[in-house]
Image: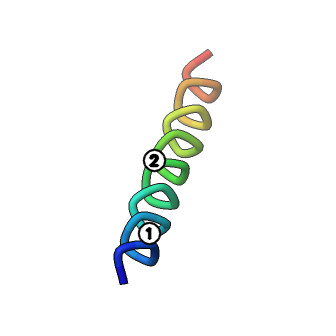
Amino acid sequence: MRLLDYRTVINHLVVMVLVHDVQFTACI
């Protein structure tokens, strides 16, 4: 269960970073 939670947190962080990069690129 802990491993699943850990992976879920990492996935959420990756998605947030990707979305942030897309918005940052769109601003430029």
Q: Is residue 8 above or below residue 26?
A: below
Within 10 Å of disc 2 (Cα), the crowding (few <14, some 14-19, many 20+) is few
Image spot of residue 13 (x, y percent): 44, 49
Q: Which residue corresponds to mark 2?
A: 16
Q: Mark 2 or 1 closer to N-term?
A: 1
| Callout 1 crowding tier (Cα within 10 Å): few <14, some 14–19, many ≥20 | few
State the residue in front, 7 or 24.
7
Q: Residue at x 45, y 47 (%)?
A: 16
Label 1 residue SS: helix
Residue at 52% x, 60% y is 11
Q: How many marks?
A: 2
State the image coordinates of residue 14 (x, y, percent, origin top left).
54, 49
Q: Amino acid at mark 1?
A: Thr
Q: Residue at x 51, y 39 (%)?
A: 17
Q: Residue furthest front?
A: 2
**Which of the labelled discs sits on residue 8, or is there none?**
1
Q: Is residue 6 above or below residue 4?
A: above
Badge 2 vs badge 1, beta-carbon distance below 8 Å: no
Where residue 6 sits, quadrant-wise, is: bottom left
